[in-house]
């Protein structure tokens, strides 16, 4: 198993003050501990790379276009993200699936574009509240996983983030039992498809992860870290989550 991963998604937030938070976070990481990744807005990638230079904090994008270049006004390619010095990119976040009508096929193509550019894709899946209430929750998540993940994924080249949409930014989290059941299903499916490599692909939980609930979430065997939104904006919130992961 690769190391555990604490990833922060700043979403559409970022200013000079946040760069100070990032520098604080970078300065705080010791030699050991989980991998730490911060995904700022695209406009701040180069600055974030500079602010984390010589530290263990890696930088990633929040989305990339599936094409390498061309007439796609306002979009950013995976190679452009790589050019900033970033090493990863989130693909398939539910906010992109909803706001930009991204399909599983789109996300699969984006993950492949990330590979072509040498980036690690953090591929997001997760159910809506209505889907969680219905009888087919796990089947729905499994179908999303199967259709979004390209062939050939390995532990080195893919991270999955399970983010129930209804838990994002709401302060509500699934029960530990639900997290365990969902992550176990995702693991079993990855192993069935990718063999030993499926066992090495990290599976993050995301959705209202806070310093107060992180330790409990990290007790689940197939939770290999977290994708954190709001609580990644301040070093004083994100560091306790990193510490809880280190202690798990
Ligand atoms: O969407 C998320 C991370 O990608 C989770 O956001 P919150 O941690 O703010 O709920």
Image: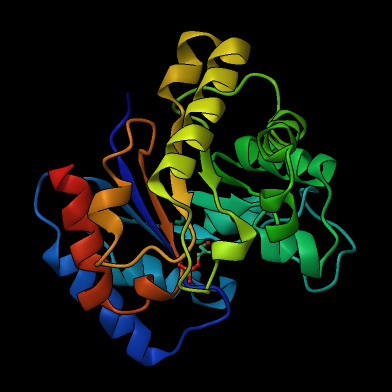
Left or right, 97 with respect to 159, comes to right
Tell which of 178 and 37 is nearer to you: 178
Q: Residue at x 48, y 27 (%)?
A: 184
Residue 143 vertical position relative to residue 219 in the rendered view, above or below: above
Residue 245 vertical position relative to residue 222 in the rendered view, above or below: below
Looking at the figure, which quarter contains the N terminus? top left
Q: Residue furthest right?
A: 71
Left or right, 9 with respect to 100, comes to left
Residue 115: quarter of image? top right
Q: Residue at x 59, y 11 (%)?
A: 192
Tell which of 182 and 91 is nearer to you: 182
Looking at the figure, which quarter contains the C terminus? top left
Residue 81: quarter of image? bottom right
The picture places residue 156, in percent across and down from the top left corner, at 44, 28
Tell which of 59 and 171 is nearer to you: 171
Total label count? 0
Residue 56 seen by the camera: no
Q: Residue at x 59, y 24 (%)?
A: 153
The picture places residue 49, in percent across and down from the top left corner, at 38, 65
Left or right, 235 with respect to 185, comes to left
Residue 186 vertical position relative to residue 31 in the rendered view, above or below: above
The picture places residue 145, in percent across and down from the top left corner, at 68, 34
The picture places residue 215, in percent across and down from the top left corner, at 23, 53
The colour scheme of the drawn protein is: rainbow
Residue 13 seen by the camera: yes
Q: Residue at x 63, y 43 (%)?
A: 114
């Amino acid at each position: 198993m690769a190391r555990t991963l604490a990833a922060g998604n700043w979403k559409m937030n970022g200013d000079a003050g946040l760069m100070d938070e990032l520098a604080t976070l970078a300065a705080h990481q010791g030699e050991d501990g989980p991998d730490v990744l911060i995904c700022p807005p695209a406009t701040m990638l180069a600055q974030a790379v500079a602010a984390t230079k010589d530290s263990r904090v890696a930088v990633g994008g929040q989305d990339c276009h599936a094409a390498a270049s061309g007439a796609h006004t306002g979009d950013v390619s995976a190679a452009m993200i790589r050019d900033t010095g970033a090493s990863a990119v989130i693909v398939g976040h539910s906010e992109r699936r909803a706001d930009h009508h991204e399909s599983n096929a789109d996300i699969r193509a984006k993950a492949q574009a990330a590979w072509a550019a040498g980036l690690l894709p953090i591929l997001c899946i997760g159910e809506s509240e209505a889907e969680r209430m219905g009888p087919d929750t796990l089947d729905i998540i499994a179908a999303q996983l199967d259709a979004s993940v390209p062939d050939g994924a390995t532990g080195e080249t893919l991270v999955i983030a399970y983010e129930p949409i209804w838990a994002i930014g709401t302060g509500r989290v699934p029960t530990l039992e639900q997290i365990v059941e969902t992550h176990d299903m995702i693991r079993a499916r990855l192993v069935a498809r990718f063999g030993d490599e499926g066992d090495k692909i990290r599976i993050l939980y995301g959705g209202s992860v806070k310093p107060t609930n992180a330790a409990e979430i990290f007790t689940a065997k197939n939770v290999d870290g977290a994708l954190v939104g709001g609580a990644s904006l301040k070093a004083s919130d994100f560091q306790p989550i990193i510490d809880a992961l280190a202690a798990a």
